[in-house]
Amino acid sequence: MTPVETTAPYRIPAGDGLANIWWKTGRMTVKVGAAETGNAFSQIETDDPRGGATPLHVHHNEDETFYVLEGEITVLVDGERIDLAASDFAFAPRGIPHAYIVTSDRARMLTTLSPGGLEELFVELGTPVLGTEPPATAALPPMPELARAFAGYGCEVLGPPPSLADLS
């Protein structure tokens, strides 16, 4: 990532970020990280296709929020189903198992992690965006490697990503 001065104001144009990576089946753009906020939070813009989902996981250090910019997602938080559309918001407190899945053709959202730092994991394991086309295969390490990497950041992978069939 290209850090900017901690707590200094800055602007990032649409479509740009401190880091742009392919992650899972979509694209992540780090808008702000721990280095820029004195570790207070990080914010990531995610653009995922239908069926794009995170593994069921729990953050032991961070609260996580989801704000949908375009499209629709379902967030599963501690067994509760929360359906979100554009301009909807959800909160997943630390220590609570959660995952999300994109239910529309595409979805763009802002995810905020507080405190910051976990964005470094995505940058470390993701595939840098070098053009407009995603890689031919999903940009996600095998599940055992992913679980080990997340554990190093205080995040526990509990199970596979939900599928659209799981929501029926």
Image: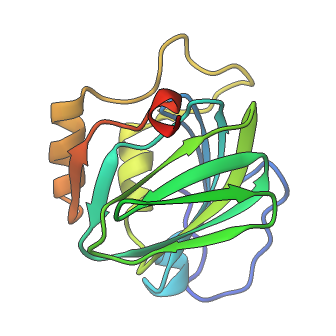
Percent across and percent down for residue 64 are 47, 71
At horizontal 43% and vertical 43% (from top left) the residue drawn is 54
Q: For this rendering, which residue is in front, 133 or 77?
A: 77
Q: Residue furthest right?
A: 14
| Above or below 65: residue 20 | above
| Above or below 87: residue 132 | above
Determine whether, in the image, residue 138 is placed left or right of residue 8.
Answer: left
| Above or below 114: residue 27 | above
At horizontal 24% and vertical 52% (from top left) the residue drawn is 150
Determine whether, in the image, residue 154 is placed left or right of residue 138.
Answer: left
How was this image coloured?
rainbow
At horizontal 44% and vertical 37% (from top left) the residue drawn is 126
Q: Residue furthest top?
A: 136
Q: For this rendering, which residue is in front, 58 or 24?
A: 58
At horizontal 48% and vertical 14% (from top left) the residue drawn is 137
Q: Quadrant of residue 131?
A: top right
Q: Residue furthest front?
A: 168
Percent across and percent down for residue 35 are 47, 76
Q: Quadrant of residue 52?
A: top right
Q: Quadrant of residue 44?
A: bottom right
Q: For this rendering, which residue is in front, 151 or 31?
A: 151
Q: For this rendering, which residue is in front, 36 or 70?
A: 70
| Above or below 22: residue 158 | below
Percent across and percent down for residue 105 are 75, 30
What is the tally of numbered marks visible in this picture? Answer: 0
Percent across and percent down for residue 136 are 54, 10
